[in-house]
Image (spheres, rainbow, N blue to C red):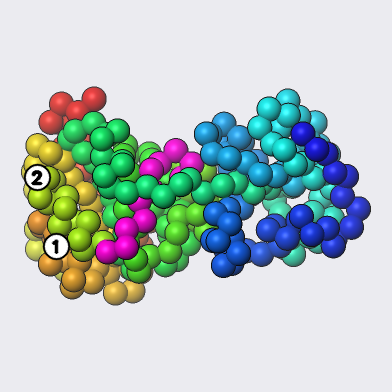
Amino acid sequence: MKITRVTSLDLQQLQPYRTLRRPEEHHRKGIFVAEGEKVVRRLLESKLKVFSVLLTPEWFDIYRSQLERRVPEVYVAPKQLVESIVGFPLHQGIMAVGGVPGLQTLETVIPDLQAPYFLAAIDGLTNAENIGVLVRNCAAFGVQAILVGETSSSPYLRRAVRNSMGAVFHLPVVHTPRLANTLADLRSRGITVMAAHPPARIPLASIEPADAGVCVVFGSEGDGISQEILSECSIAVSIPMRNNVDSLNVGSASAVFLYEVQKRLKGLNRS
């Protein structure tokens, strides 16, 4: 482990920490930024590659043994200097650069999962905070993998990683070049593809999952699920609501949907 005591804001190796966005260079290099003590700790505990950590002396003393086992480059700087480097105030002075897992496809993921399958898919979802919350909900309620459509943003965006609280490190993510085709594939396997669609008349509580399992599809913040994707869904269901509320934020809605589906899958003797 190489330890660098940071005294300058211009250190080139710290460039990945300087932006809240995931620029093209991050995408090309296959890296992401994790921030906050819990998120970095969960990254260190995961199987993902960790390229470097930027942290205060206090956090360095706490995590030194783990860093020595997992991290080749460690940058130590006072909290005020860390905040100057990243360009915004930090609640906690610890961050890391990790490696996005290699490309995964439905064909590589499915054999490692247990039926009945429990999957989630996102169509046109671009808000990083919402994606992060959805990923966290997926992990909490036992989703086995998340399918990211071509019109959705990556769960490895900086804000998404932070809002998932590191749950994304332990959940297979399949980036599909054509979500409609992937959903058609799932239906051919006997899996119920369920649209979380507020205008639908079928209430969520009435669903009966297929023995093969369920994939719940969530749509964009403003427009919901596209017509192309709706046409590939087996069923469209909604959460009954009162007081003229016609929809929920996808973070809230996904928690309700996934909890309800999880209960029904347990009824199919899924361990």
Residue at 70% across, 44% down: 52
Residue 32 visible in the picture:
no
In this orientation, which residue lies closer to the viewer: 36 or 44? Answer: 44
- Mark 2, secondary structure of its residue: loop
- N-term mark: 2 or 1: 2
Span of residues in magenta: 168-178
- Going by the numbered disc 2, the residue's amino acid type is Gly
Residue 191 visible in the picture:
yes
- Mark 1, secondary structure of its residue: loop
Where, quadrant-wise, is the C terminus in this rendering? top left
In this orientation, which residue lies closer to the viewer: 169 or 185? Answer: 185
- Residue 134's spot in the image, x, y percent? 38, 52
- Residue 167's spot in the image, x, y percent? 46, 42
Q: How many marks?
A: 2
Quarter of the view holding residue 246: bottom left
The disc label shown at residue 190, or none: 2
